[in-house]
Amino acid sequence: MKPARFAYQRAATTEHVLEALHRSGGEARVIAGGQSLVPMLNMRLARPALLVDIMHVAALSHVDDDGARLIIGAGVRQRDLEMRHDTAARQPLLAMALPWLGHVQTRSRGTVCGSIAHADPSAELPLVLTALRGEVHLRSRRRARRLPAEAFFTGMMVTARAEDELIEAVSVPAVRPGTGYAFREISRRHGDFAIAAFAAVADEKELRLAIGGVAETPKARVLPTDQGLDDALDTFAWNLEARDDLHASARYRRELVRRIGREVVLAAIRDREARALKEAT
């Protein structure tokens, strides 16, 4: 199929983007890498009156590091972040997940913020943003605001972004001493969307596990590290409102949470211990 007719605007500045979104009355869509939006246009699942291309806006193409967090602009491609020399050192969980996003060809076009905007519950980047307690930076002509990931993702491919808002960037905390990370994904083939995906963060105060691909949004819980872990995982799996689809049943997904979730949180604890030992020497 071919997309429905639309106008196209190549924005030169962030202000141009915001003005176009403001004037469109909700009929505009932002296009960056286009890996999710273009198929939706071709299938006529999306019928915007205007496409606003942001990939020539220099202000949106940077990864900034303020010491406490990485701020990833809306124009940063997934492959560029993956190949950045300090991504693994500054945020290991992000580096663990990036190779699982589709294939090299799609990562070379797709953007980090584009995946967040699409909000597929099986996608890796929404999961990582949730696990790390990252934030989505939203901006319109009227205001700028930041939302925690868990407040931003409101349903399957549904977010809290207003029609006139641009996802200007996302931010994740940089690595902290004494913190361990682990990531694992179960899918039919490498590059497919996850049947279930797991991201864990373990520090001296808490153990946090996030699950993607099971419910309508990524979900995270703080779990005990003692003998109560199995019971906590069982409760987490039951409360996820797992879904059936052609790839897996809800029951199978819950069982993955119980079994693979346990392996991932233990891997994060081991990673924390290894990092602490390295920091001490």
Image: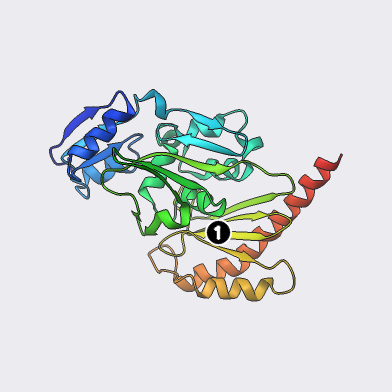
**Which quadrant would residue 109 be assigned to in this image?**
top left
Pinpoint residue 155: horizontal percent, then vertical percent: 36, 60
Side of 126 where 208 appears, left or right:
right
Residue at 29%, 49% in the rendered image: 162
Amino acid carrying label 1: it is Ala
Which residue sits furthest front?
142
Residue sitting at x 62%, y 67%: 259
Note whether 211 is above or below 12 in the view shown. below
Q: Where does the image place residue 191, in percent across and percent down from the top left?
A: 47, 46
- In the displayed structure, does residue 178 sit left or right of residue 89? right
Q: On the image, numbered disc 1 is attached to which residue? A: 210
Q: Is residue 81 visible?
A: yes
Give the structural element (helix, strand or loop) at label 1: strand
Specify the quadrant that holds the C terminus: top right
Relative side of 9 to 176, left or right: left
Q: Position of residue 185 (x, y in %)?
A: 55, 54
- Position of 184 relative to 258 (above/below): above
Asked whether the viewer can see residue 121, the reply is no
Q: Residue at x 40, y 56 (%)?
A: 153
Q: In screen coordinates, is 8 left or right of 102? A: left
Residue 41 image offset from top left, x and y in percent: 22, 43
Where 251 falls versus 269 (above or below)?
below
Q: How is the image coloured?
A: rainbow
| Quarter that holds the N terminus | top left
